[in-house]
Image (cartoon, rainbow, N blue to C red):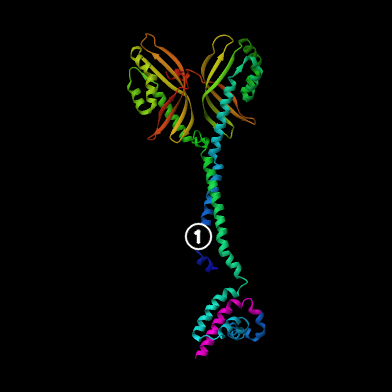
Amino acid sequence: MARTTRGNPLLTAAAALALLAAGGAGWGGWSWYAAAHDESAAYATARDEVLAAGEQAVQNMNTLDHRDLRRGLDTWRSSATGELLAQLDDGRPQFERQIRQARTVTSAKVLSGAVTELDTRAGRASVMVALRITVTPPEGRPAAKESRMLGELTRTPGGWKLSALGQAPVGDTAAAAD
Amino acid sequence: MSTTRHLINRRRRLATAQAPRTTAPPRHAGPPDGPARTTGTDRAEDTSTTKTTSTTKRTGTKKRTGTPKTTDTTNTTGTEDRTGPTSTGATSPPRTRPRRGLPAALGVLTVLLGGFAAWATGEAAALRDTPSARNAALTDMARTSEVKGQVTKAVNELFSYDYAAAAPADRAVRTHLTGKAVEQHRTMLAPVRSRAAQQKLVLTTTVTHSGVELIDGDRARVLVYADQSNTRTAAKKAETTYGAAMFAVEAVRKDGAWRIAVIDTLGAGS
């Protein structure tokens, strides 16, 4: 037996190559596993999910057509959770009346967005969304304005939803700095 | 002398030929010469005489075909070397097959393992190379706060201007800007600079919120919300107006410091 392995260079070479390939396979497999279970990659995925959900929700909350109020407000509801949802439900009758009177069509476009905080364990996140809101009155030209939105998101069984939304306050810090 | 030498040679030869065989086949031939089994050494000698007939009949006949005694010994060892593997015929075919079969099997294994290695490495690289995984915003906390801090400081300094002291503003331009942003900044601040002395302008910009959208190696994009106060001290009663700004900056890391390379006003002057 010793004679066969010692005397057969082909076998020795084949064994060495197989060993090398086994090493490569082991390393490759480990690397693949590590990449698939990378915590930072999972966190990055969550961040991108939060940003996409946040931008969509903020856009939804700034889109409303008086001709199709019901659907618009249902979209608002589906984008919100927690405190924000409660506020929406509380103010809905009054708000509907206002929009019916104003007869405006509001649309929004996300200019840029960023996740500023993300706690995947607690399921909470904060986003900044730069928005251009266009309000079209029944008569006259549509008016566009830029809006600096700040949102807080909470993870729900139905995905990340806005639990708070507001505009970044103006002038506070500048006044304080003076 | 020659006959004894021949005999010794034959014995030696037979003893070596016997050695591997004693384990299996000779046992059947063994019992007849029962008394010889007492000791190993005795047996080797004894069987040599008896076995010439049973086991090495072929060599025996070959020998007797009449070749010179000197060549005879070499010849027989030669044949025995050849007969050795063939006489143990029961084990030889599985031994010759692995000689060709084993390298082939190892070759197949190499190809399979190598294939898996390549596939797994590719898979791992693909997972690591997604735009999501490449973006280190928030995932790399140290980098993220570094970018945030430096961009905030840069914006505060770049968009603040005191008519009485222009030096810090000029220094800010040199330290915080690069590339296209130099020209962008100049055009943006031109109206302020032109009116500054006359109106005794003091412009103060304070970043209130910033969010890192992207960090890809030495490139980053940051969304900035800032408050601006514009104070005209030329009038008897200082007048201050407040404004809100939102824009994004693209920064590049050079010599350990982040510099603003592009100012993105998000399609509006704001």
Height in image: B204 above or below A159? above
Height in image: B213 above or below B197? below
Which amino acid, mark 1? Answer: Ala
In the image, B6 versus A118, the foreground residue is B6
Judge left or right: residue B71 versus residue A160.
left
Residue under the image location 43 percent in, 13 percent down: B241
Residue A80 seen in this snapshot: no
Counting from the top left corner in percent of width and height, residue A73 is at 64, 19
Find disc 1 in the rendering and name its residue. Answer: A13
Residue B102 seen in this snapshot: yes
Height in image: A122 above or below B113? above
Counting from the top left corner in percent of width and height, residue B109 is at 56, 55
Q: Is residue B24 magenta?
A: yes
In the image, A67 versus B59, the foreground residue is B59
Residue under the image location 59 percent in, 65 percent down: B97
Q: What type of secondary structure mainly makes up the magenta span? A: helix
In the image, B70 versus A47, the foreground residue is B70
Residue under the image location 60 percent in, 68 percent down: B93
Start-end of magenta stretch:
B1-27
Judging from the image, what secondary structure is the residue with disc 1 in? helix
